[in-house]
Amino acid sequence: MALPASPTALDLRTYDDLLAMPEDGNRYELIFGEIVMSAAPKTKHQRASMALSATLQNYVVTHRVGELFAAPTDVKFSIYSVVQPDLIFVGRERAHIVTENFIDGAPDLVIEILSPSNRAQDLVKKAALYAQHGVTEYWIVDPESETISINLLRGGQYIEVPNRGGIAHSTVLPGLGVPAADIFSVP
């Protein structure tokens, strides 16, 4: 996947610029030197996030394999790219990248839940960013189509792992199968 066009060197924003953004209730990220604002997520997005959090946290705690974080947790890839994925998993072997203020480097697994306002950004820019920095597994969760797409990094590109029987299977978290129907069911 080719990297998206980025701002010229004179226009690049840094982590310091991101930290200087106002505390106005908006979520700001820095992608390839460009500050991007995300709208507040809709309830369908939040339901999926909560269901995934519960499922993954149960797995992570039961198997004692690492830590799970939720937005807004900064993942700092460089001074030009700092994002807040919806969910982030860092394996026990890489716990050293978890600092007090942010995750410093590529997590093992990142989950983005698509919203109408961020769809293109998550599918193109963030996918390129995650691949470039070596995020092993990238999940794309789409509340509109009620699907979970797990993508595994191979040769610098993401290859989709086929779902079996409506269940998304993780490679980073062996034995974890997530039925899409469970994530998108309304109580």
Image (cartoon, rainbow, N blue to C red):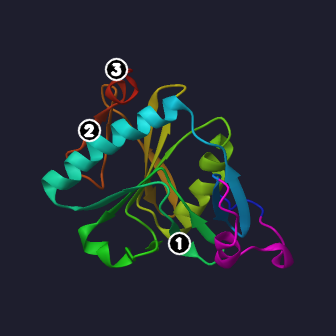
Q: Residue furthest left?
A: 62
**Residue at figure coordinates x 24%, y 69% from the top left:** 92
Quote the CA–CA distance across marks 3 and 2.
21 Å
Q: Residue 121 location, x and y as percent?
A: 66, 49
Helix, strand or loop at mark 3: loop
Q: Residue 119 location, x and y as percent?
A: 64, 41
Of discs 3 and 2, which sits in the foreground?
3
User: What residue span does the magenta drawing correspond to?
Assistant: 6-24
Q: Residue 147 location, x and y as percent?
A: 45, 30
Which residue is tagged 1? 76
Q: Quadrant of residue 34?
A: bottom right
Q: Quadrant of residue 68?
A: bottom left
Instruction: Classify 10 Å Cα crowding around label 1: few (below 14), some (14-19), many (20 and above).
Output: many
Quote the CA–CA distance across marks 1 and 3.
35 Å
Residue 125 is left or right of residue 56, and the answer is: right
**Amino acid type assigned to the residue bearing label 2 in the image:** Gly
Which residue is tagged 3? 187
